[in-house]
Image: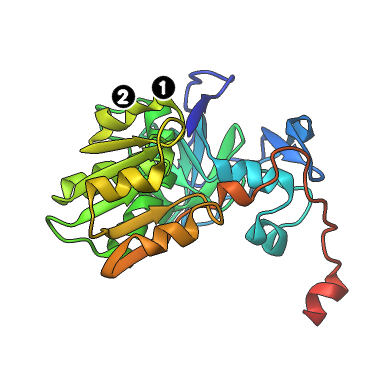
Amino acid sequence: MNAIQQANGARTTHGSKGTEGARDVRKVVIHSAGSYDQLKIETGRSVVMGPDDVVIDVRAIGVNYADVVVRMGLYASAKELVGWPITPGFEVSGVVRSVGSNVGDLAVGTRVLAVTLFNGYASELTVPRHQVFAIPDNLGFEEAAGFPAVFLTAHFALWNLAHPRKGDRVLVHSAAGGVGGCLVQLAKRAGCEVTGVVGSTHKIEAARALGCHHVIDKSKEDLWKRAEQISARGFDVVLDANGIETLKKSYDHLRPAGKLVVYGFSTMMPKKGCLLYTSPSPRDRTRS
């Protein structure tokens, strides 16, 4: 995951509490499924702020693989909730421009990060107060924008699904990636013995730096033979981001009562091109 700093730079915040009118907002819009050339920068009008909302001058935007899946036309909730056109983006950071009349605990000018269901690729974002969080002093805008999606996904996978205990042996696929790297850090913090799997030799040091006790480079060695050498009786938790390529073997290498958590499906995605779909009509949506 990366964070893209907004080209509009560090603007002076001049908002207030519930008094601003509509403004021009720059945003990335996708009108149909395809490659990166489907990303179009357009100008629209700002969203009307409600009494419980916060308006953010966006300084950085988190970029996730899920955004690519949206662009390719394969993201289920994007189809169900929005259709075309759509502005992708699940996380941003910036400065509070204005707040709704019911928001009394967040001052204009505060540095914040926010999560959103789409619409993040924009120069301004309006979201409910409960989706906005102050940025710690030791984080910049880019770091803050790149934090929520990967760590929330990793936290849910570990603590809502896997429930690892101290001393458990945990295998993390894609250990140098966004979510994978967060899984490594959280599992190590929980006192687990972490084995990370990477797909290229240049990622080994990154996985080690994140906290892996063992790293398997599947481009150079037999993944499952090496996994058996590390933990002959299998793993208490396996976190798989690949899908069909490794899913069966991941399951086979669980200890009794072990848990397999799937957090991605990279090998099941097209490497080029896209799957086209037509946004359902109101009649189709009613029928379904």
Residue sitting at 70 percent across and 53 percent down? 74
In the rendered structure, which amino acid carries the disc numbered 2? Answer: Glu
Q: Which mark is residue 205?
A: 2
Q: Is residue 59 above or below residue 241?
A: above
User: Is 4 on the left or on the right of 277, as rendered?
Assistant: left
Q: In which quarter of the image is residue 19?
A: top right
Residue 109 image point, x, y percent: 39, 31
Q: Residues within 10 Å of mark 2 (few under 14, many from 20)?
A: few
Q: Which mark is residue 202?
A: 1
Between 170 and 87, which is closer to the camera in this rendering? 170
Q: In this view, does 88 lie above or below 144?
A: below
Residue 41 image point, x, y percent: 74, 29
In the rendered structure, which amino acid carries the disc numbered 1? Answer: His
Q: In this view, does 286 lie above or below 81?
A: below
Disc 2, SS: helix
User: Is 244 on the left or on the right of 219, as rendered?
Assistant: right
Question: Which image quarter is the C terminus in?
Answer: bottom right
Between 90 and 168, which is closer to the camera in this rendering? 168
**The furthest residue to the bottom:** 287
Between 3 and 170, which is closer to the camera in this rendering? 170
Label pair 1/2, CB-CB below 8 angstroms:
yes
